[in-house]
Amino acid sequence: MATLPAVKQFSDRINRIEISATMAVVAEAAQLKAGGADLVEFGAGEPHFPTPQHIKDAAIAAINNNCTRYTAVAGIQELRTAIVRRHAADFGSMYQPSECMVSTGGKLALFNALQVLVDHGDEVIVPVPYWVSFKDIIEYAGGKCVFVETDETDNFRLTPEMIERQITPRTRAIIVNTPNNPSGAVLNPADFSAILRLAHKRGIYVIADECYVYLNFTPRCFSAGSVTDVKQHLLIVGSLSKTYAMTGWRLGYAMAPAPIINAMTKLQSQSTSSTAHMVQMAGLAAVTGPQDCVEKMKKDYIQLRDLTLGHLSLIPDVSCVKPEGAFYVYPNVSAYFGKSGINSAADVAKRLLHEAHVVTVPGEAFGTREHIRLSYATSPTEIERGMERMQEWFGKL
């Protein structure tokens, strides 16, 4: 009997990517928790604060006012106008509502941008450490990641010279995430401006991931949009998730030249269509309402960061660069490699989870093998509990 030819099960593009590492950690932790384990969670990157009340009230009012139907794919005009006005007021950017679109989370805006810009074989420069989804979204689009290693002894500093060395005729885009997830590093405004102008001069796009732009602990909050003369080759991807504690609402946006926004909107029209109307109304209340909630959360994050760093300093041979933004620490645990069967950050994270019941994310997910990421977006009590467990666990190695 003739043997039937093997049938290909999945597309090449889906086989190029993996499930999000942070989501995998969350899933594994959930299984342990369902079994009764008392976990301290430093894994998921989301604020522990509730969404501010005036934002929730706006969504409830929107539902009661029957804002429950489709909207324009790119979002309601009022929200797009409010986003560009808020960004202009805070950073001096110069966008029109026609140069802004709303998406179901910042990740979708990033996905749309890379699918629109990147073709097979195109290169995208990605500084390391990088947010977990950058690599997979680029590879899904058929692009090639060109990694730029930064050095923690220099506070993970990224310079234009480091970028320029990696530019080739195939370079299509550069992704810059500042404040950085996972390291909390903040790109120096002068260095960032030089990178933007370098890319603009070469006709290369910069995709600025501004997920944590308002959680910048340095004296100067800076946006790529402040450099208005490079606008032609700049895409800003933003999110309300971290700024306003709205992770589960799934509300993001992009700002870019109108032809790019139109192309991204065309793609979105064939995938998710519009973001839920009542969610957009909540976002409108967030960006046009009082901003003191943002400053309050930022001040609390600084205190939580310092509390976490204080405890980390008590663990022998664990070093950690002081984060200047976001809500993560990224300690180097490589001094423990070779002890008790530990050979990588993945080993450390797995054993911390199963033996100490502390949830962290291994650095391999972010392009390094020496670190683990901890989110300090939790209560001081949980930080104390988790750090005590970590100190005890490392002390036994």
Image (cartoon, rainbow, N blue to C red):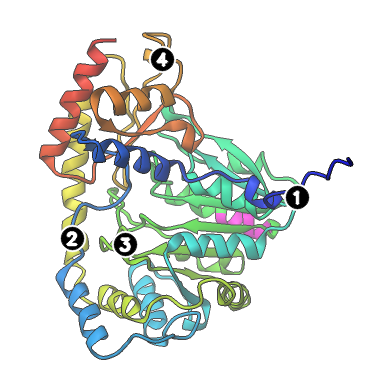
Near mark 1 (Cα within 10 A), the count class, few <14, some 14-19 or many ≥20, is some
Of the residues shown, which amino acid type is indicated by label 4? Answer: Ile
At 25% from the left and 41% from the top, the residue drawn is 34
For residue 248, which numbered disc appears in the image?
3
Q: Is residue 292 above or below residue 319?
A: below
> How far across and down, in percent of the image, does residue 187 sit?
43, 46
> How far across and down, in percent of the image, does residue 121 sit?
75, 50
At 17% from the left and 75% from the top, the residue drawn is 54
Of the residues shown, which amino acid type is indicated by label 1? Answer: Gly
For residue 226, which numbered disc appears in the image?
none
Q: At numbered mark 4, what does the secondary structure look like: helix, strand or loop?
A: loop
The label nearer to you, 3 versus 1, is 3
> How far across and down, in percent of the image, does residue 272 sit?
51, 72
Q: Earlier in the sequence, mark 1 or mark 4?
A: 1
Q: CA distance from mark 4 to mark 3?
A: 35 Å
> Which residues are the magenta region?
196-201
Q: Is residue 191 magenta?
A: no
Q: Earlier in the sequence, mark 4 or mark 3?
A: 3
> For mark 2, what is the residue?
50
The C terminus sits in image quarter: top left
> For mark 1, what is the residue?
121
Of the residues shown, which amino acid type is indicated by label 3? Answer: Gly
Left or right: 234 as drawn, with respect to 42:
right
> For mark 4, what is the residue?
342
Of the residues shown, which amino acid type is indicated by label 2? Answer: Pro
Residue farthest right in this picture: 2
Q: CA distance from mark 3 to mark 1?
A: 35 Å
Near mark 3 (Cα within 10 A), the count class, few <14, some 14-19 or many ≥20, is few
